[in-house]
Amino acid sequence: MKTGKLIIFSAPSGCGKSTIIGWLMRHSELRLAFSISCTSRQPRGTEQNGVEYFFITPEEFRRRIDNGEFLEYEEVYKDRFYGTLKEQVERQSAQGDNVVFDVDVKGGCNIKKYYGSRALSIFIQPPSIDELRRRLEGRGTDAPEVIDDRIARAEFELTFAGQFDRVVVNDDLQKAEEETLAIVKEFLGL
């Protein structure tokens, strides 16, 4: 069985990254599987260990950081870690899966640096900051100050776009999905 490849997606919040990834996941010919991340938070609702995340204690997370077991990680809040274990990625790709990462820009850059040409990094970009603000406001889920924070973070994240292999501007969702599919198929040799 052929070892799978790695496909990294990053984007500011509200750019349609999750929608595009979800659409790609329905294309069985791509043999895509989500990277299963690790977290130190408790499971929510029906989440299961080894399915949505690997749930470990903050102490175990720190021990694994010290042992160099993560491709990337972040302490989002005190003792609340999220990260990607090298061993899990290798296990998934050894099964022939093409592993998909949905990570922040720094995590995406770290994974790409570690795997080099075995990984494809794709940055999903909004057509403009004004359009991104309109989309976030249109969701109706965030207070104005939360939207302001997301816009400020997006402006920072957009400075990383040039470090990714490919940039897809999501001006029209269907066009962005098709463009991303073509990029992924080319990378996978399909």
Image: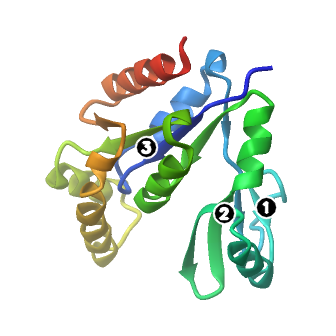
Q: Residue furthest bottom?
A: 78
Distance between the Cα atoms at labels 3 and 2?
A: 23 Å
Residue 7, horizontal then vertical, whole percent? 54, 37
Residue 74 falls in image quadrant: bottom right
Q: Quadrant of the N terminus?
A: top right
Image x and y of residue 57, in percent:
80, 79
Query: 114 above or below 5?
Result: below
**Disc 2 residue crowd, few under 14, some 14–19, many 20+, Cα 10 Å:** many
Give the crowd class for mark 3: few <14, some 14-19, many >=20 residues within 10 Å: many
CA gap between label 3 and label 1 equals 23 Å
Identify which amino acid the numbered label 3 is placed on.
Lys
Mark 2, residue position: 70
Question: Can the viewer see residue 26 in this picture?
Answer: yes
- What residue type is disc 1 on? Phe
**Which numbered disc covers residue 17?**
3
Q: Is residue 52 visible?
A: no
At 61% from the left edge and 21% from the top edge, which residue is drawn? 30
Comparing 177 with 146, the one in front is 177
Q: Residues within 10 Å of mark 1 (few under 14, many from 20)?
A: many
Query: Who's the residue at 45% across and 22% down the image?
Result: 181
Dot 2: element: strand
Q: Residue furthest right?
A: 49
Q: Quadrant of the C terminus?
A: top right
Q: What residue would you read off at disc 1?
A: 54
